Image: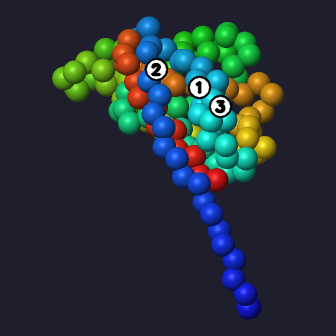
Amino acid sequence: MSGSFLLLIYINMNIINISTTKRVDLVNITSQVQKVVSESSVNEGIVTVFVPHTTCGITINEGADPDVVRDIRYQLEKLIPYQQGYKHMEGNSDSHIKTCIVGSSENIIIKDGQLVLGTWQSIFLCDFDGSRNRKVYIKIIG
């Protein structure tokens, strides 16, 4: 193979702050993530959305019907109830367990400067130990 080429990769990191209002709160952050992507001018790439908290996660799910969020919250609380004799002294073991199930990050494809999400999909910050102010790291590679 002869010749050479130049490959330029754009890498950017942003932090957004999200305030939650309930102990278990799922906040749709899709528009904030899209804003960061749009401001980056990246047309093709990937964005990682990450929370550096042990009682807070990130997920992608339906954002059109608020009953879906209510059902997710209800079932997680039913499966992993608050204060059920856990040993962790801070009293928020259920929050740690819920975060293990949900996970702390999501990767989303960027195409034509837009997040590639299904028609009904949205990105949610899932706070299981609120109300709090949470940091969300948004890393774009394109």
Residue 34's mark? 3
Q: Would you say 126 lies left or right of 41 here?
A: left
Q: Amino acid at mark 2?
A: Ile
Determine contact: label 1, label 3, CB under 8 Å.
Answer: yes
- First of labels 1, 2 by sequence position: 2
Label 3 SS? helix
- First of labels 3, 2 by sequence position: 2
Q: Is residue 103 above or below residue 92?
A: below
Residue labelled with disc 2: 18
Residue that appears at 40% across and 24% down: 134
Residue that appears at 67% across and 46% down: 42
Q: Amino acid at mark 1?
A: Gln
Determine contact: label 3, label 2, CB under 8 Å.
Answer: no
Determine contact: label 1, label 2, CB under 8 Å.
Answer: yes
Residue labelled with disc 1: 32
Residue that extends furthest to the bottom in the rendered view of this protein: 2
In-front residue for pair 17/97: 17
In-front residue for pair 99/77: 99
Q: Rounded to the nearest whole Å, what is the CA distance between mark 3 and mark 2?
A: 15 Å
Q: Is residue 98 above or below residue 22?
A: below
Residue 76's mark? none
